[in-house]
Image (spheres, rainbow, N blue to C red):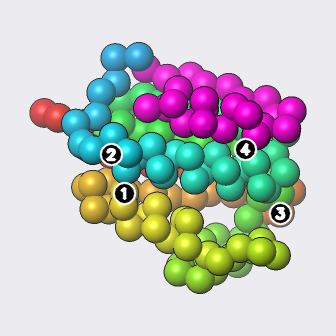
Amino acid sequence: MIHDAVQMRAGARDGIELAVDADQALRLVMPRHQPLDIVVNLVNNAVQARAKRVEIHAAREDGCARIDVVDDGVGIARDQLQDIFTCGLTTKKDGRGFGLHFSALVARELGGSLSAASDGLGAGARFTLRLPLPA
């Protein structure tokens, strides 16, 4: 799924370095399109944040799949970080503020979570998707 997300963005990377470090044995048991949509949205956001490098890490952690999308883009202002998943909140001139909100809702619907971290403007961002693994 992660490699598919990367391939979907391959034609539009515009010189962005995209690195993937994924546990090949990691398998989710859920509709494939939902986590794929989330990861594609996170990579798209990194591209729109003028990232030069995007890293995707996927590993097993505490009974969950942990997928991190890390970029070196414009970052997120500390005062916006707590509200980043609010419907309608956008920092983009032509944005609508639905992508991260929708992604967080889908993650919760799948029994997981989506979180964001950034050290502020100019410091890039890390989005962490956690999804349950079968017992």
Identify the residue at horizontal 64%, vertical 46% (top origin): 43
Tell me the kind of residue under disc 3: Leu
Q: Which residues are magenta?
A: 1-23
Which label's residue is closer to the chain start, 2 or 4? 4
Residue 129, given in percent of the width and then of the height, sits at 45, 48
Q: Which residue is mark 2?
A: 131
Q: How many marks?
A: 4
- List the residue tagged with mark 1: 107
Q: CA distance from mark 4 to mark 1?
A: 20 Å
Q: Quick one: label 2, few (<14), some, or many (20+) residues within 10 Å?
A: many
For residue 78, above or below residue 12: below
Q: Which residue is mark 4?
A: 71
Residue name at image x 57 percent, y 58 percent: 116
Tell me if residue 11 comes above or below residue 89 in the rendering: above
Give the spatial CA distance, label 3 vs label 4.
12 Å
Q: Is label 4 in a helix, a strand or a loop?
A: strand
Residue 13 falls within the magenta-colored stretch: yes
Which amino acid is tagged 1? Ala
Q: Dot 3 surroundings within 10 Å: few (below 14), some, or many (20 or more)?
A: few
Residue 7: x, y in percent?
60, 30
Q: Are marks 1 and 2 in contact (CB under 8 Å)?
A: yes
Q: Quadrant of the C terminus?
A: top left
Q: Secondary structure at mark 1?
A: helix
The answer to whether 57 is drawn above or below residue 131 in the figure is above
Instruction: Please say if the residues under marks 4 and 1 sit with CB atoms less than 8 Å apart.
Output: no
- Of marks 4 and 1, which one's residue comes earlier in the chain? 4
Residue 20 falls in which quadrant of the image?
A: top right
Alpha carbons under labels 1 and 3: distance apart: 26 Å
Give the residue type at disc 2.
Answer: Leu
Task: First in sequence, mark 3 or 2: give its number.
Answer: 3
- Mark 3, residue position: 121
